[in-house]
Structure formats: C-alpha cells, structure tokens
Amino acid sequence: MSAATPPALPKPLSGRELDLLEKANSSPSTGASSGQTSERRSLRIAIVTENFLPKIDGVTRTLAMLLEHLQAEGHEALVLGPASTLTSYAGAEVVSTKGIPLLGVYRGLGLNFLRPRFIRKLREFKPDIIQFTDPIWLCAQTIPMVQYYFPDTPLVSSYHTNLAMYATLFGFSWLTPVMWSLQRNLHGRCNLSFCPSPSTARMLEQQGFQNLRIWPRGVDVEMFRPEARDYALRQSWGVEPQDLDADRPSPRVHASDSRISCDELPPLNLPPPYSAQPASTFSATSPSKLVVLYVGRISWEKNLRLLIEAFRGLQEPDLATNRPACQLVFVGDGPARAEAESLCKKYGLDALFLGFKKGEQLAAAYASADIFAFPSFTETFGQVVSEAQASGLPVVGLKAEGVSDLVDHGRTGLLLDLNDLRPVATSGSQPPAYSATPSAIPSDPHALLDLSSPTFPTAVSLYRSLIASLATNPDLRRTMAAAAYDVASKRSWFGAMEQLVDGYRDLTAARDARLAQHEKDELALSRTSTIEFDVVCDDRAEKVDGETAQSTGASTPQRRRRLLRLDGVFKRSGRRFQDGSVSLAPLKWLAPKPAVVATNGGIVLTASKGDDGASSKLMVHLFEGAVFFCLLYVAVSWMAQLEALAFIRV
C-alpha cells in the first residue's frame, strides 16, 4: 500500500484573485432575496469627459481603469468626449467631437463643443446613469441638454482637477472665484459628486459643494513591486559600479529591453510581505549613489523648481554625516522638460531625464530608486505616490491636498508642512519634527512656494533637509519603505471601482422607487373621472370665473381648470402632460418659473424644469467660463515669452 501523497502547498493568490475573492465576499449569496439579486443587475453607464485617451494623464488612466472594470463586471458603457483616435475602448463605444486646441498650454487639451450626435447616441443607449468627468466646458454644454431630454436619469460627477488652483498658477488669480462658482454650479446639478480623497472632499465642502462621496484609487501590486528592482538599469543610470557582479539576482529584464505591453504579460503571484532587496551599502565613500526619483508630468505647476533647488548640494557625498552621493532621476514628459534640463545643467546636477515610461519599464524605474520625491501641491489624489509606495519607496512630499491622505508623516514618508516654514533641527536618526498640533492644508500654497515669495528659500532648505535625513539613515528608509508597501498593497482597484458602482446603484434604486411611486399616483388619478389643474403661468393676474387672482411678490396667479379623463392613465410624456388625445402646451423651459402641476387631492404630478432662474445662472457661468478660456488662449504666447525671459535672467 503506497504512502499517502502529502497535500500540495496552496499557491499564493494573485492580485486579481484577491479582487475576485473580495467580489465574492461582497456579492449576495445564492439564497439571496429577489431584491438583492435585482440590486446587482448590470448597468448602462454613459460617461461625458473633457479629456480622454490617447492622451495619458491621471484622469485618462482612471477612466481607462473604470471602463475595464465595467466591462469585466458585465456593465455597458458609452464614452462621449473630445477628439480621439479611438472608436472603442474596453467594449465601450467612443464618440468624439471637435474643439479648439489650447496651443502652448496643454498638449492634447482644447475647448470642445457639444454635438447633436451626443444626444442621439444617448437616446439610443438609454443609460441608467450619466457621469460627467471633471465638468467644465463640454460638460457645461451637455448637462442642461441631458437634464432636458433625460429628466429621470440620475447624474453623477467626478472631481479630478483643481482648476481654480491652475487659474492662479497661470496668472489668472482674479478668475479663481469664477472657476469655483462655475464648478460648484455644474457639480451641484448632479445627484452625487465623487472626489478621490478626504482632503479634497473637505476642501470642496468649504467651497459649498454638496452630495460628496469618496471615490478612491487602487494600485496594481502585480506590476509595481519591490522585486522589480533592476541593477542593470541602475548601472545604466551610473549609480552602480560597472564591475558589479553580473550574476546578482535581478527578477526582471533590463527595463530598456522590455517591449511587452502590460496587457500581454501573464498573471504574476502577489509578492510576499515586503523585505528589503539586496542593495549596495550606501555611505559617503561608497561608489554607489542613492537615487531620488520623480515620476509625473514635467511642468512647472508640479512645483519642480522646489525639487531642483533643494537637490543642490545633494549630488556630492557628505563625509560629516556619512551621506552618500545622490542622483536625481525624472521619469515623464511635459512642456517644461527642456527648461528643467537646462536649469539642472546650470546647477551642475547632472540629472537624468528618461522621458515617458509605462508598464514594466515604469515598474523597474520605481523599484530601482531609493527615495520618491513628489513636491506637487495641485494633486487631488497622487496616483504616482501609491505606485511608488507599492514599489517599496519612502515618499518626500508636501502636506497638501491628496498627498497628505496617502503619506503618513514619520511613518511612510516625510511631508513638508507649509504652515510651519521655519528652520527645524534634524539628525541622522530622526526625521524633522513639526508642531504636535495638526495644521490645516494651506488654501493657497502657491503664494508660499512662488519663486518670488520670501518663504521660498526656507521651503527649499526644509525640503532638502527631508531628503537628506532619509539619505543619511538607511534604517529609517527601510522602515518607511516597509510601512509604505504595507499600506499601498491594501489599495484594491476592484474595491475602489465598486465604491463608484455602489453610488450608481444607490441612485438607480432611488430613481426606481420614485418612478414606482409615480406609477401608483398615476393609477390613483386614472380611477377618477375628472382632474383639476393648477396652471402656474406668469406674473400677470388672470380672471377666473369672474374673480381676479391677486398676485403677490411670493406667489403666482393660478387658474383652476377641470379636464375630463378620456381614456387610459394620465401621465407625463416628454415636455407634455398627456391623457389620450388631451394634452397641454409644451413648457417654456427658459421661463423664470416654468412649472405645470396637476393635482387631485394630495396627489401631485409636476413638470417643473429646474429651480428658479437656474438656466439663467448657468448661462452666466458659461459666459464666465468662456471669458476665462478665451483669455487663457489669447495669453498663451505672451506667458511663454515671459517664462522664457525669466529663465534667461536666472
């Protein structure tokens, strides 16, 4: 009799398998009630966006992940957006429109205009939910039309970009209140507004936004992981000696040799709990250098001037503190790349600019660095921060919107507190400490970090001390890297996207309940032989059966009418109340108080089109937005000349 075969060890779960397990745990059981089953029905989602692929940025990457998630979960999607070379993505049809490019401001962005085809596509698609992504220009034209043609369809918006802050950065600070007013109006027309982080939600609440929910972001822990560290890549950067043992373990091929799309890679097992990769011993006399990495758009609104100025003096080793030499590496592209390269050469920094990377190349760049520096204060989330943490890097950033939600100062990284710009004592073993009292995020960090601001030199000195404290202390780096990895590995894309889908379901459930009650009201009306109408007209007094309805400043004259029900159920159809062959005239949608109500006892049907003056207010905000973008468009060449002159003087 043969010996029993020992049981096989369980295979580690991949990130996708973990997501599926999370989905299974959150799904209703087979014995669930019919109500629970209907709650999980597939949805039809229409997405109107100001920005889309093939342009790559945080917004388009998030939308791509959302569309892939909707397809994987059996939902249908339709994308309406700017000009694109794509006609479909992840099973969703992409319908594009033409616009005026914003030359010199952002490549790939423009002022896009609503097409009648958008409304036709929406009517054919019959969406359950319509989502507006970063509504500002195209969405401002689309929202009123959607409210008009789809009055029962729930609307959601998602906030991704602090446009008011960008108005300040581009020299139009006087338009900041206008931008807030326009965004508040557009988001306020939706049933729910999603934002990516708690700090952004608090900021929006202070600006008067309502009905806010958090829609977080996940991170691909199969792609971004400490095991992707590539010593051959570090040699190509010049931070490792060329005589390094070629057989030293390197889990991935040289990043520059990788030509495989991340979509074509086979599934990988989830990495084990973080353990420091074998690395060179960094010291003031070591031939190896410590890599400080930045990943993101190379543009001045990312506050890169602070990073470049702070890095001065760090490229050489410090024998007094045993700090090794540091190498500054930029991954990304953008309009300020040439100027940033020139500035680094002027300061003798010998920084590396690697250009745009993605997939395994990007993962290898993250994992092959030692510190992640991210000085931006315009982020609403900071996806690259999550990717760096998943790669096992401590983060040096600012206590600003978005980043402060991801980095725990002193535990997973170090944050410069802009409210406390004063010299602080540092040592090789402890990070700089700030006041024990938590401080609020500054409402205008640009005023503190502008090149001409008196606080800028202090900010540079403090940011340099944060990087130096990590560079000097390998134990602190290792401890923070492990904590950062542990936090980032718990951020699931499936869980993040399901929070948004849960919002969809809440709105559709409320809509269905409202329509069901409406059907009951119609049925009650159908059982009467007559119904009375209170027709709200305008501010003119009308004679009713020999009497004059008196008009006051707070009320509108009314006229009682009785109408015989001819056949069927009295119901609303489009812009008309109809019952068989009897109907009322279409409403004047842009009238100050367009409303028609039909009453029978306590039962009320209404065809009101928005709150008082809402359309007029929207027209005003559209005009204000048009003024802003036109001025921005006209001033592009002038601003470029000023920036060029400023760098010539430096």
Image (cartoon, rainbow, N blue to C red):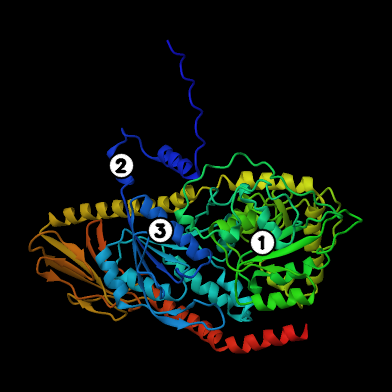
In which quarter of the view is residue 157 placed?
Answer: bottom left
- Dividing the picture into quadrants, the one containing residue 256 is bottom right
- Image disc number at residue 11: none
Q: Which residue is mark 3?
A: 67
Q: Amino acid at mark 2?
A: Thr
Q: Tell me the residue that label 2 is attached to.
A: 37
Q: Nearer the viewer, residue 495 or 53?
A: 53
Q: Earlier in the sequence, mark 2 or mark 1?
A: 2
Which marked residue is nearer to the observer: mark 2 or mark 3?
A: 3
**Quarter of the image that includes the C terminus:** bottom right
Q: Is residue 352 above or below residue 74?
A: below
Amino acid type, callout 1? Ala
Identified by mark 3, the residue type is Leu
Q: Disc 1, disc 3: CB below 8 Å? A: no
Tell me residue 79's x, y (percent).
37, 66
Residue found at x 48% / y 23%: 7
Q: Position of residue 369 (x, y in %)?
A: 69, 56
Front one among 211 and 60: 60
Q: Is residue 623 left or right of residue 447?
A: left
- Give coordinates of residue 336: x percent, y percent: 64, 76
> What residue appears at the point 46 percent right and 41 percent down from the top-left corner?
17
> Between marks 1 and 3, how big is the CA–CA gap?
29 Å
Q: Earlier in the sequence, mark 2 or mark 3?
A: 2
* Secondary element type, mark 3: helix
* Disc marking residue 400: 1
Which residue is depicted at the point 24% across and 79% down? Answer: 542
Q: Quadrant of residue 331?
A: bottom right
Which structural element holds mark 1?
Answer: loop
